[in-house]
Amino acid sequence: MELLKEGGVTAAQGFKAASTAAGIKYQGRTDMAMVYSEVPCVCAGTFTSNVVKAACVLWDKEITESGRPMQAVVVNSGIANACTGEEGFAACRKTAEAVQEALGIPSDTVAVASTGVIGMQLPVEKLAAGVKAMAPELGSSVESGTAASKAIMTTDTINKEIAVTFEAAGKKITLGGMSKGSGMIHPNMCTMLGFLTTDLSIDKALLQEALSSVIVDTFNMITVDGDTSTNDTLLLMANGLAGNEKITEKNADYEEFYKALEYVCTYLAKTMASDGEGATKLFECKVVNAKSKEDARTLSKAVVGSNLSKAAIFGCDANFGRFLCAMGYSGAKFDQTDVELFFESVAGRLRVFDHGVPLNFDEELAVKIMKEKEVTVFVDMHEGSEEATAWGCDLTYDYVKINADYRS
């Protein structure tokens, strides 16, 4: 597998993207994007676990579960189209119909996604105008993909995109993607929009199985603030234009694809965690030698999800009791006298707790370690052989400032 220096949703053969300033909510910036495949794609998707689901989530779930192909995705930022009743569904339908008119593809192969303020109605005429403006601008260049990744941002401070190549049946395959997410991020799924594209030829059921499996240890292992959105959507489109023999079973080619998918999703997940609203650091917790995989996941997510832990990371305070406390209420059962806990970063590694006993450690070194942009709490449970890693960010003053006036 090779990481492309540049690339995103347009890296794979046959995929194009465009963006425009439609004036959905924001003025003077791009706020609408489209991703299009020259041929219909098999598709897979995963969506929010929130009972309150946006109209676009229900629209996309119907497409991915129906067995129909998907050929385009239209995304807007600024307004979430959640809690909008029948008018919200009409906005989805009319957006898809605008794509049908502009590109000549069936409206029921067009996915839609929205992000932004909940409870506001979308201006349908602006959506339709945006589609009409983007259709002739669709391009396969890196720049087109990057512009699309920027158009779907809300409180994100950086755009998020990646592309990799790998081989399947002697053919070069490309997998690219983009995502957005900065606030309202919590596992199952984390709050996000993500769009992945590949020129691989693969059975739809296998595509869905791979995506559903990969998110467990990638997108479902990040948290920013404990809030699970109404709009979480991750779509994966495969158009088969690489010309490989279609993958219909879990063979060596499937495994190569799975590794590439895992890499791409991990990268996007970590990038979203590090770009949490107001964040200054990526906060990682790695739990090793746990009794079970589920325990390792539960423990690591509890640590990065704790507001007290996140505040300690922000303040460079090596208050290891906060991390042990979070582990203790996580629901996982363990013996605290088995636990070792370390702080790690590029500045060094420091053990602060050893088998139930606090250690006298170098406070200056602890501060030095915790001042880095990426800080890891490493926990050895000494009770088994399973491990998991969760990602989050520090909790800063700016998080409150951003969310206190989000609508304005």
Image (cartoon, rainbow, N blue to C red):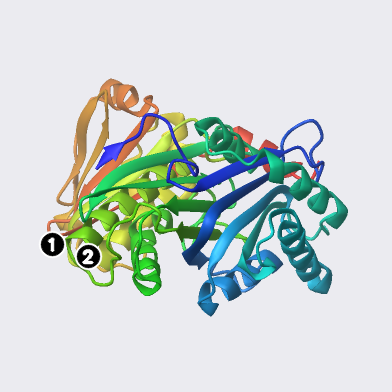
Q: Quadrant of the N terminus?
A: top left
Q: Position of residue 259 (x, y in %)?
A: 26, 53
Residue contact between numbered discs 2 and 1, judged by CB atoms under 8 Å: yes
Q: Position of residue 163 (x, y in %)?
A: 39, 40
| Residue 61 placement: quadrant | bottom right
Query: How many marks on residues?
Result: 2
| Residue 388 placement: quadrant | bottom left
Residue designated by label 2: 334
Residue drawn 46% across and 52% down? 196
Q: Quadrant of the C terminus?
A: top right
Residue drawn 46% across and 30% down? 315
Q: Secondary structure at mark 1?
A: loop
Q: If you read the primary sequence from the N terminus, does the residue marked by circle 2 or circle 1 appear first?
A: 2
* Relative to 155, 248 lies left or right: left
Q: Position of residue 75 (x, y in %)?
A: 66, 51
* Relative to 187, 261 lies left or right: left
- 10 Å neighbourhood of mark 1: few (<14), some, or many (≥20)? some
